[in-house]
Amino acid sequence: GILIKLGSYGFIRFTLPLFPDACQYFSPLIFTLAVIAVIYASLTTIRQTDLKRIIAYSSVGHMGTVMLSIFSLSLIGIEGSIFLQIAHGLVSSALFIVVTLIYERHHTRIVKYYRGLTLTMPLYSMIFLFFTLANIAVPLSCNFVGEFLSLLAVFQVNPLIGLLSCAGIVLSAAYALFLYNRVCFGEMSMYLKHSQYSRDITRREFYVLLPLIIFTLFFGIYPQIILDTLHTSVFAIILS
């Protein structure tokens, strides 16, 4: 939830204030590399068969969007990138926890092993669906606010790059919904039918995920509590 954000933090905290002219000069190059990262990482995610790899590779695509919004060098873009990093820290961490819960039960992360978990784990499936939708930036989730602000800033600077980066939204929906559909829907997997570990999440596991659910919804409905806090600092970076 934190480590993957260190690079973008370094750009915001050090590169933009110290080298503003270089950031302006190299922004077309960064745009090109970032949009390639968004599309390539999303296409790579689609072909993964490991549950954790799917979530990890999707994070690379989201960070490509963060880089695009940072180098838009606008107030909306930098605020959107910071907000998206916070949102991604909540949702991606929750998805890793969700995947780990079934890994602890069945000791495998291969997607083909799972099917029909909704039949035995309905509460787990609901929580998994919530964070899957949040990960693809459905409205009322904090990811939606972050991606909307980020892409808005990119469109204002370069409409072509903005259009290409929107492909990441479509591809993220493809791999996220494929993963959820494969794991939770359909007939019960033959490997799980006689498993004694296909029990729903426990109270302890639910309370671990509950704060992430609350913050994901709260920041999606009321993003101003973060954006108002960021405004003065980001404005100072833009002026520098």
Image: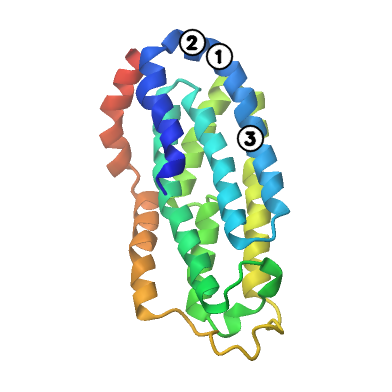
Above-or-below relation of 179 to 155:
below
Q: Which residue is mark 1?
A: 26
Q: Secondary structure at mark 2?
A: helix
When asked about the image quadrant of residue 218, the answer is bottom left
Q: Nearer the viewer, residue 2 or 153?
A: 2
* Relative vertical location of residue 43 with respect to residue 8 in this rendering, above or below: below
Residue type at tag 3: Ala
The image shows residue 199 at horizontal and vertical percentages of: 50, 85
- Which residue is depicted at the point 33% across and 12% down? 240
Residue with the mark numbered 3: 37
Report how far apart the C-alphas of labels 1 and 2 lie in the structure.
6 Å
In front: 90, or 9?
A: 9
Residue 120 badge: none
Mark 1 crowd level (few <14, some 14–19, many ≥20, 10 Å Cα): few
Q: Which residue is label 2 attached to?
A: 22
Quadrant of the rendered image containing residue 107: bottom right
Which residue lies at the image location 48% right of the left edge and 53% below the top edge?
92
Regarding mark 1 in the picture, which secondary structure is present there? helix
The correct choice, above or below, for 121 with respect to 231 in the image is below
- The amino acid beneath tag 2 is Ala
Q: Which is more N-terminal, label 2 or label 3? A: 2
Q: CA distance from mark 3 to mark 2?
A: 21 Å
**Can you give x and y, in whole percent of width and height, for residue 91 in the image?**
45, 54
Mark 1 near mark 2, Cβ–Cβ under 8 Å?
yes
Answer with mark 3 or mark 1, whichever residue precedes in sequence: 1
